[in-house]
Structure formats: structure tokens, C-alpha cells
């Protein structure tokens, strides 16, 4: 089955700096890659996603890049703010008749004021 | 517009007991998926249901079962509880089984003692 590895496990940045979180996946059949933000005690919330026919997608301060050949994808957050502090999870999913997400182990992002 | 609702929010059970967790999807969403999130890890896929049929099953023992009702709500049942079943159980809904943009509920925190 699919295996997703996520790095780093913890990341501290100064407010205003950029943060980058990287994930690799094992199954070349995976074609959908969402990123979720989970604040302490709350539900995971989708922040951005990308399909395998696209190399990059941006939404304001957040961007995701995908390298299908290398089987890795990354989350980029620019101009970080304290409210960006949370655990971020990447995930991968194959096509077919169901949407089964395989999640990475998470990155605890701390934005220092 | 209500999001995905789960009940109960917290639950304490004894080893060997049975538990039933409930989920109501967003209005109009016909697909419901269940995930288990152990503390400090990413969510792990358990089941996906669409139109009352199982569309996917993760690597969980037969003690775990689920069903979906005509109104698209769903139940997750776990028999013969083990200490290792202690986790946050998340329900997610989407319009279709292959739909992007899963929306997660806030989860049920199950503690097995």
C-alpha cells in the first residue's frame, strides 16, 4: 500500500519568515495530495490540495509543489503569522472508486512572535 | 449550515467492551469515511461508505465494523475493546466517494481503560 513520509517533525520559524514542509510518497498511482492543518484539540482542516496533473498551486500565502518523477510534494507558507502555529499533515490518495487518504506523521509548526 | 457532526465527543470504556460512534455528514454529502488518529500520529483510514455500501476498508481487524443509513449518517462499531484502541476517531464526509476536499468532524475521543 501507499506510504507517506513527512519532514521535519517539528519546525520553528520567526514571524514573517517562510516555512517549508516536505513529503514523499511511495505509490506512483497516487494522484491527489491534500494538506491539512490541525490545531490542538480540533479537527483537521483542508488548507490546500493538488492533483497530479498540476505542478504547483497557490492560495494567498500558501503554495504546494509536486514533483511526480521524484514522488515528493511540499507545502510552502510565506510571511508566517502566530496563528499559523499548528500541526500540518500531508496526505496522498490514489484514484479508483474510493478516496482513501494515507497521511504523513505530521509537522508541528511554531511561529515565534 | 452544519458541518460534520460526531457523537459523543468523549467516551471512556473498559477493555472488552463494545462501543458505537456516530456521524452525520454535511447536508448533501453522500460519502462518509472513518479514520483513527492515535496521539502524535496522522489519521489512519478505517472505512469509506457511499450510498450505504462499503467502498474501502483499511488495515484494521474485524472487531471494527461500520454501516451507513439511508439518510447518509454512519456508525462505527468496535468490539472487544483493547487499550490500543484509545484514539481520536474522525469522520469525514464528501459529495462523492472520489470527491476531493473531505471535511472532517471534530471527532470522538475514545479512552479504553
Image (tube, grey):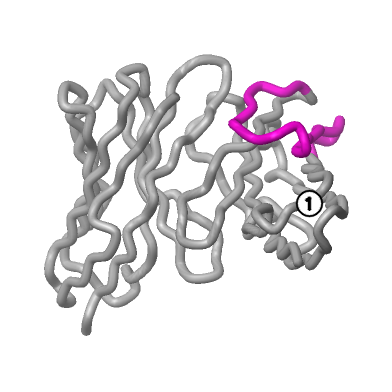
Q: Is residue B35 visible?
A: yes
Q: Eyeballing the image, is A41 above or below B107?
A: below
Q: Chain of mark 1?
A: B
What's the residue at 17%, 72% (across, down)?
Answer: A13
Looking at the picture, how far across and down is residue B88, in whole percent?
A: 63, 58
What's the residue at 32%, 58% (across, down)?
Answer: A107
Q: Neighbour class for label 1 at 10 Å: few (<14), some, many (≥20)?
A: many
At mark 1, the secondary structure is: loop
Compared across the picture, whether A32 is left or right of B43 comes to left
State the residue in front, B37 or B112. Answer: B112
Q: Quadrant of the N terminus of chain B?
A: bottom right
Give the residue at the far bottom of this rendering. A113
Give the residue at the far left of this rendering. A17
Compared across the picture, whether A6 is left or right of B20 comes to left
Q: Quadrant of residue B49?
A: top right
Q: Eyeballing the image, is B26 above or below A72?
A: below
Q: Eyeballing the image, is A80 above or below A99?
A: below
Which residues make up the magenta segment? B53-73
State the residue in front, B92 or A4. Answer: A4
Compared across the picture, whether A86 is left or right of B69 comes to left
What's the residue at 82%, 63% (across, down)?
Answer: B13
Q: Which residue is mark 1?
A: B81
Q: Is residue B1 visible?
A: no
Q: Quadrant of the C terminus of chain B?
A: bottom right
Q: Eyeballing the image, is B113 above or below B92?
A: below
Looking at the picture, how far across and down is residue A76, in whole percent?
A: 20, 52
Amino acid at each position: 500500500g501507499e506510504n507517506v513520509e513527512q519532514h521535519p517533525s517539528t519546525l520553528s520559524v520567526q514571524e514573517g519568515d517562510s516555512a517549508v514542509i516536505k513529503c514523499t510518497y511511495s505509490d506512483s498511482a497516487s494522484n491527489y495530495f491534500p494538506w491539512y492543518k490541525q490545531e490542538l484539540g480540533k479537527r483537521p482542516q483542508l488548507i490546500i490540495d493538488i492533483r497530479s496533473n498540476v505542478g504547483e498551486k497557490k492560495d494567498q500565502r500558501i503554495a504546494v509543489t509536486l514533483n511526480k518523477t521524484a514522488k515528493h510534494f511540499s507545502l510552502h507558507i510565506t510571511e508566517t503569522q502566530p496563528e499559523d502555529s499548528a500541526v500540518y499533515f500531508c496526505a496522498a490518495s490514489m484514484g479508483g472508486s474510493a478516496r482513501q487518504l494515507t497521511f504523513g506523521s505530521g509537522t508541528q509548526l511554531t511561529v515565534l512572535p | 449550515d452544519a458541518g460534520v457532526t460526531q457523537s459523543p465527543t468523549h467516551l471512556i470504556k473498559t477493555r472488552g467492551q463494545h462501543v458505537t460512534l456516530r456521524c452525520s455528514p454535511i447536508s448533501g454529502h453522500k460519502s462518509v469515511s472513518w479514520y483513527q488518529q492515535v496521539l502524535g500520529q496522522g489519521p489512519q483510514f478505517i472505512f469509506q461508505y457511499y450510498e450505504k455500501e462499503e467502498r474501502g476498508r483499511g488495515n484494521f481487524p474485524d472487531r471494527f465494523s461500520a454501516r451507513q443509513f439511508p439518510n447518509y449518517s454512519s456508525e462505527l462499531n468496535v468490539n472487544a475493546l483493547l487499550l490500543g484502541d484509545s484514539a481520536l476517531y474522525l469522520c469525514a464526509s464528501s459529495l462523492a466517494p472520489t470527491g476531493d476536499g473531505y471535511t472532517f468532524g471534530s471527532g470522538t475521543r475514545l479512552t479504553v481503560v
